[in-house]
Amino acid sequence: MNINSHSVEVRDLDLHFGEVKVLQELNIDIHEGEFLVLLGSSGCGKSTLLNCIAGLLDVTDGQIFIKGQNVTWKEPSDRGIGMVFQSYALYPQMTVEGNLSFGLKNARVARDEIAKRVARAAEILQIEPLLKRKPGALSGGQRQRVAIGRALVRDVDVFLFDEPLSNLDAKLRTDLRVELKRLHQQLKNTMIYVTHDQVEAMTLADRIAIMKGGKIMQLGSPDEIYNRPQNIYVAGFIGSPAMNMIEGRIDNGHFAGHDLSLPLDGYEFERTDHHAGPVAIGIRPEHVLTGDAVETAAAQAEVEVQIVEKLGSDTLVHSTLGSLNLRFRMDGLSRVTEGDRLRIGFDTSRASLFDAVTETRL
Amino acid sequence: MTLADTARVSDNPVRRPKQLFRNLSAKFASIPMILTALVVFVGGTAWTVAHSFTKSRLLPKWDFVGLDQYERLWNSNRWIISVENLLIYGVCSLVLTMVLGFTLAALLDRKIRFEGAFRTIFLYPFALSFIVTGLAWQWILNPDFGIQGVVRNMGWESFTFDPLNDPDIVIFGILIAGLWQGTGFVMVIMLAGLRGIDEDIWKAARVDGIGITKTYVRVIIPMMRPVFVTALVIIASGIIKLYDLVVAQTNGGPGIASEVPAKYVINYMFEAQNLAQGFAASTMMLLSVIIVLVPWAYLEFGGKKRG
Amino acid sequence: MVDATSPTAGRILEGPRGSKPKSRLSRRNIFLYGTLLLVSIYYLLPLYVMIVTSLKGMPEIRLGNIFAPPVEITFEPWVKAWAEACTGINCDGLSRGFGNSVKILIPSLILSISIASVNGYALANWRFKGSEVFFTILIIGAFIPYQTMLYPIVIILREIGLMGSLWGLVLVHTVFGMPILTLLFRNYFTSLPEELFKAARVDGAGFWGVYFRVMLPMSIPIFVVAMILQVTGIWNDFLFGVIYTKPETYPMTVQLNNIVNSVQGIKEYNVNMAATLLTGLVPLVIYFVSGKLFVRGIAAGAVKG
């Protein structure tokens, strides 16, 4: 194993607050120049992990390497990281320029070098006109740019982002998301990004680590996470609206449950295709076929429409099939109404099959 | 774990720093706090309690006499009067400051004009010392020139209002001054509590057709329970310290009619040169604080753990 | 536009419309302002009486009514209170007590606030094992009657040679101001966003760097609140002053009490009231100048405590 190709390595990391195990046996390798997103709901330990990498929290056990150097017990400022916070955390009494140069002054960088780096960061982030202002006089988007700039001037290899866009309104969030992506392409730094927003995760990440209860549930590219979730938790977490989960058994190459029989010919089993115990099949709402496409499907069923949500671009239908609730998407112009009976089809090649007991992918 | 990893763990160049030396500046900066807490508060109190079981007089001496000092204390007429006075003053002061303080706060909270002016007037005595308060009221209650004198001069010769020279009511004379000084403070706490209540509660009560007084009694006051409790604890711990006011206003007189425990302690420790008696009396004061505070602390923090 | 001749429009125009008529002298208002004015008189009366008494000559006081304004205004009592009033053998007035109080106040203020603010900062941002335990003891200590600690402090001050000196009293004020001030600062620093502290750590600032460069500039209001709290508290102190200083170093409150309550000589009520007002002047000025901050200070100290 060539350790130099890894920018950040986390080895067997444990963090306990008294009896509570916040992080357990965590291992991640983050490549040079990679954009890694730590994704999970609140309390999953994603921000805690980021704070450990930054050195803002003392780990209970394990090691952290940055650029091959063991930094487990180093001060945050000596780790070669820059960090951007959710609340921006700009020093209110300093000007933008003061905010950008504070870290460099602490590191006793020469004055002309500071000026050079501040100017460069300001140029990249297009905040030159703001340099003499105080944070109080800036808009939310401008503040977040300054916060990014503060990481930028440090000229470090690893950027840490702790939910940087959460305090911004929806429109600005989208804009800054694109800008962050551009910044990453331009700088090619390693970036570790914590968020609970799956759209941010899917659009920004090279790889996503989905966390729950201080453990990593799956680490993979957005494509893998979305299409090949490794367990029921990840399957349910990613995708909005959530994946339909149908419980049943595998019977003679078919999934059987809730009066449905779905042929599994097209499904790529990762482990075994002869699973005797109970299973669950997950089908995303967008992979339920409606309209003319139904005829091409190997398995079909008739559902009763309960609630119709018009989203403009498409229509979300909540329906029942016997005792089973099914959600699926239809075209934005479709005219279904509550009470309609509708034929739908299933494409099992894009479904996910899980062992219902261990909750892992089959 | 691969072999390479194991090797890396063993020649890890960065040692885990010693626990004692981590965060050293913070520990260094906390030395005054630690010294105060341990030496003065814990150590000092323990020392005093321990020496209350001795017969120290002019100088502290370690000759144990058991509960002798306490026996003398509770046989002392002056101490009994002190405790009675403190009880009367304490109960009256607690009830009246709470009721008046809340009423004033509620009146000020009715979106009135000149709220700032009224608040300034009600609170200014709190900025003054007990000495100033005591001397001012000593003058107003002066029998010859104060309220009694003025009323008598107006022709009502038999009018009598001389609390500071009447042993039976002298403590109420002190109470008048105490209330004048402290009620504004309770009002401010209550006002802060009232302002902390969601405006929507008032709107909901109005929509439900509940009258103002009824809303206060049934909705607002129960919601302000924590504020009442803190106010109570603060007033109570202030009452037990009652000393300066008495010294300034009556100096314990007439006779020993307005003595209070804090004064008893100081007289015995620093004037009568009977240290152990003072220590025993102060231990009794400590005990009464514990009796008041422990149930409160238990109710407040006992059930749930707070971080 | 609504056609005024239509039947519905008529109905609209008949009913209540526009702002509700209010009478300024409603019964509610008479009760409300009446009560407040009455209470205000109770609160203002002592101040008024003190002022008018201090401006009268003794003959006028003996004959007249304490509530009556002075017939002839004289500042003689003020001059006498400040420069000539006697305590024991010293007859140089309250000016000496004032000087002592200032000499006690300023170092106490600086020492207690700097120590407590650093303590509060350490407790909010740099917790270490046991820091909360010490803090809890400190807060419980605030409820212990001073009387149980008075004598041990005498011993400590004697041992370090500060008994009876101004610096001994400074130390005492620093110690007893610590619980409330530390609480005040700890709560304030805890309320600041934690991310700011983290950002400063990433930027390489250490314990003192974060304190002086980041926290301090953001905390001016709370320092002002702490100062108000301490100025009034220390200035108004009597108990510590009377125990830990000697006649030459008595603070103003102690000297005032000795002047007014001295048994010798004839009572000069006008001088007494002038002296009382002089002693109350410093906290009163602080109170009227600081206004909202004073209220904020005592409310913060109380509600959170």
Image (spheres, coloured by chain):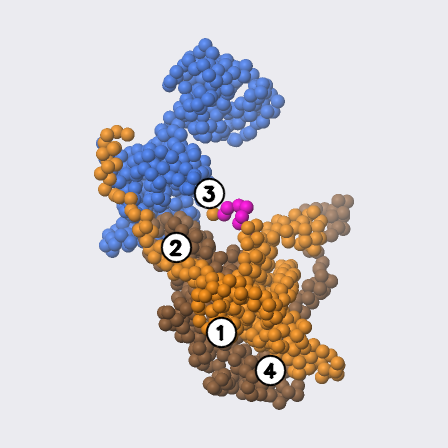
Chain colours: A blue, B orange, C brown
**Circle on res. C122:** 2
User: Is there CB contact under 8 Å for labels 2 and 4?
Assistant: no
C38, above or below A117, in the image: below
What is the C-alpha distance between the residues marked 2 and 1?
Answer: 42 Å
Q: Nearer the viewer, residue B264 or C197?
A: B264
Picture quadrant where residue A192 is located: top left
Left or right: C268, with C10 as reference point: left
Residue at image coords 51%, 75%: B272
Magenta stretch: give its range.
Answer: B300-306
Q: Are marks 1 and 4 on the same chain?
A: no
What is the C-alpha distance between the residues marked 1 and 4?
Answer: 39 Å
User: Is there CB contact under 8 Å for labels 1 and 3?
Assistant: no
Q: Quadrant of the C terminus of chain A?
A: top left
What is the C-alpha distance between the residues marked 4 and 3?
Answer: 65 Å
Question: What residue type is disc 1 on?
Answer: Gln
Q: Chain of mark 3?
A: A
Residue at image coords 52%, 68%: B277
Magenta stretch holds residue A192:
no
Q: Are marks 1 and 3 on the same chain?
A: no
Residue at image coords 59%, 51%: B198
Question: What residue type is disc 4 on?
Answer: Thr
User: Is there CB contact under 8 Å for labels 3 and 2?
Assistant: no
Question: What residue type is disc 2 on?
Answer: Ala
Tag 4 residue? C53
